[in-house]
Image (cartoon, rainbow, N blue to C red):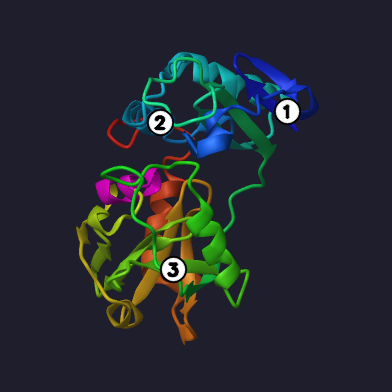
Amino acid sequence: MYLWHDGNVKREEEIRISPFDHGYLYGMGVFETFRTYEGHPFLFDDHIERLQMSCAAIGIQLPYGREQLLRAVEDLYRVYEEQDLYIRLNVSGGARDIGLSSEPYAEPTVLLYAKPIGQRQPAERALETVRLARSTPETSYRLKSHHYMNNLVAKRHLFNQEAEGLFLTKEGFICEGLTSNIFWRYGNQWYTPPLETGALNGITRQFIMEQVLVEERLALLPQLIEADEILCTNSIQEVVAVSSLDGRTFPGLTGQGYQSIRTLFDQVVQTKWSRRKQG
């Protein structure tokens, strides 16, 4: 695997990260995942904006701006002979003495992981409620951070390891998937959990809410089970049709909502830099 590490493309065996990096010791780090379409990193500006906000929230001084990070993506695209890529842009605090630190992290470790990704395909999955409640956010809102133990333990609770797990809050409200946001509809009206549940404000979630009328609503599991259609969304798979929830069948790929929203992506994935801008 090739990675971009602090300014240069390297093979994985060439990269050295300090064992004193606070991303390793204390989970002090954030990341973004996205993919390219014919070389275009879809909604790249939105991902960089959220990364900058996340770094600021935990005191990491990101040393690279938008243009430098875009060149890093372009460099990896060329190294992989212009194959479309799954990209993980990872920022950890960097090396520091053992112990909790209140000082800003001025020398973080910045990595872009990259691997070839296949062409877009229609996707559907079963959805399964996990027994473990969603943990509370790291700050006043959910960051896309290195704190993934809740997700990993919940993954092990799944009966069907191919399913997406559904997190509920400790009060029993619908929150999010293990790696996705959740949308559902009754008739023509779409709903999604509010961020107060602790759900991540996903970039794909934000894009859909710019394109489609969606109401944020607190909902319990029985309300979700009674929906006409359910979707999961993330930045790698875009939108995934739910074929079943805890054994109850849903429309999956045949759902009219899924087909309509996937069409929205068809029109923009090779051109759009931000959900707020044309082109």
Residue highlighted by disc 2 = 51
x and y percent of residue 148 in the render?
51, 50
Q: Is residue 13 left or right of residue 220?
A: right
x and y percent of residue 142 in the render?
34, 47
Foreground residue among 149 and 250: 149
Say which element carries label 1: strand
Tell me the crowding category of disc 2: few under 14, some 14 to 19, or many 20 or more residues within 10 angstroms, Cα based.
Answer: many
Q: Earlier in the sequence, mark 1 or mark 2?
A: 1
Q: Residue at x 69, y 22 (%)?
A: 78
Residue highlighted by disc 3 = 166
Say which element carries label 2: helix
Q: Earlier in the sequence, mark 3 or mark 1?
A: 1
Q: Residue at x 39, y 28 (%)?
A: 55
* Residue 136 vertical position relative to residue 158 in the rendered view, above or below: above
The nearer-to-camera label among 3 and 1 is: 3
Residue highlighted by disc 1 = 2
- Indicate the quadrant containing the C terminus: top left, top right, bottom left or bottom right: top left
Is the stretch drawn in magenta largely helix, strand or loop? helix
